[in-house]
């Protein structure tokens, strides 16, 4: 499907807006809280969404290498939908929940000196590295995925291919690292 120059230009502007608004909205979660709503069931769900996205990204890669382009396109659309669903679940959970701290063994929402001392420095360092790279790359991947998709939609497959050489591994890392972060932090969730 060919897009008009005007529509392409408008979509590029929308991608820029979304690439700014989404991270700002997520950052606002640390300020905006809705008390009295228990959405503690959501973290394993959105971790599962991340895991499913990772699996489907591998399938999408296999399909494009096999030249099964319609299957590839459909799987990528599902991955994009799952990413939106993940974002909605993530936002809902964090708007209704306090921050969980790595090492908070008594689940009181605070990290006492004894809890800090008891956690393994190597494991905590690994967790912090994975979390930080996950956060930074999840911000960067938004415009990358959207521009990659737009190039394909416009029929500019050379540009699409160039973009996806960087986009796919970052998107895959964000999906997989989201699952890893969940499993590392989940023992410290309070109820």
Image: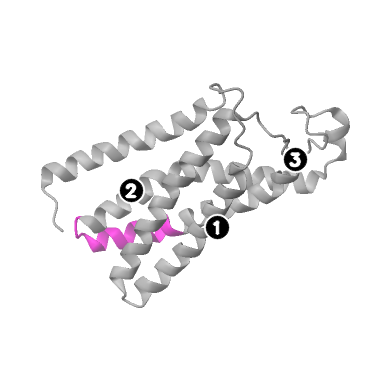
State the image coordinates of residue 147 (x, y, percent, origin top left).
30, 49
Residue visible at 41% across and 35% down in the picture? 22
State the image coordinates of residue 72 (x, y, percent, origin top left).
34, 67
Q: Is residue 128 above or below residue 160?
A: above
Distance in Å between CA atoms under marks 1 and 2? 20 Å
Drawn side of residue 2 relative to residue 191, left or right:
left
Residue 162 in the magenta stretch? The answer is yes
Element marked by disc 3 = helix
Distance in Å between CA atoms under marks 1 and 3? 20 Å
Question: For residue 176, what is the image quadrant?
Answer: bottom right
Q: Which residues are magenta?
A: 154-168
Which of the labelled discs sits on residue 188, or is there none?
Answer: 3
On the image, numbered disc 1 is attached to which residue? 51
Question: For residue 74, what is the image quadrant?
Answer: bottom left
Distance in Å between CA atoms under marks 2 and 3? 34 Å
Q: Are marks 1 and 3 in contact (CB under 8 Å)?
A: no
Residue 165 in the magenta stretch? The answer is yes
Comes first in the chain, label 2 or label 3: 2
Question: For residue 149, what is the image quadrant?
Answer: bottom left
Query: Which one is closest to the eye, mark 1 or mark 2?
Result: 1
On the image, numbered disc 2 is attached to which residue? 146
Query: Which one is closest to the eye, mark 2 or mark 3?
Result: 3
Drawn side of residue 84 relative to residue 68, left or right:
right
Residue visible at 53% across and 28% down in the picture? 29
Comes first in the chain, label 1 or label 2: 1
State the image coordinates of residue 126 (x, y, percent, origin top left).
71, 48
- In this orientation, which residue lies closer to the viewer: 54 or 5? 54
Magenta segment main secondary structure = helix
Q: Are marks 1 and 2 in contact (CB under 8 Å)?
A: no
Comes first in the chain, label 1 or label 3: 1
Mark 3 nearby-residue class (10 Å; few <14, some 14–19, many ≥20)? some
Drawn side of residue 170 relative to residue 99, left or right:
left
């Amino acid at each position: 499907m060919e897009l008009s120059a005007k529509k392409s230009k408008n979509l590029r502007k929308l991608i820029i807006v979304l690439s700014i608004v989404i991270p700002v909205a997520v950052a606002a979660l640390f300020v905006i809280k809705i008390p009295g709503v228990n959405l503690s069931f959501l973290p394993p769900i959105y971790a599962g969404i991340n895991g499913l996205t990772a699996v489907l990204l591998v399938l999408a890669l296999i399909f494009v290498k096999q030249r099964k382009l319609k299957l590839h396109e459909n799987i990528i659309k599902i991955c994009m939908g799952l990413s939106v669903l993940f974002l909605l679940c993530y936002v809902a959970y964090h708007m209704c929940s306090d921050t969980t701290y790595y090492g908070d063994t008594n689940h009181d929402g605070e990290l006492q000196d004894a809890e800090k001392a008891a956690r393994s420095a190597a494991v905590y360092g690994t967790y912090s590295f994975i979390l930080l790279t996950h956060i930074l790359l999840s911000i960067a991947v938004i415009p990358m995925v959207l521009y990659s998709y737009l190039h394909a939609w416009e029929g500019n497959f050379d540009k699409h291919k160039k973009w996806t050489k960087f986009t796919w591994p970052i998107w895959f890392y964000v999906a997989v690292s989201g699952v890893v972060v969940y499993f590392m932090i989940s023992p410290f969730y309070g109820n």
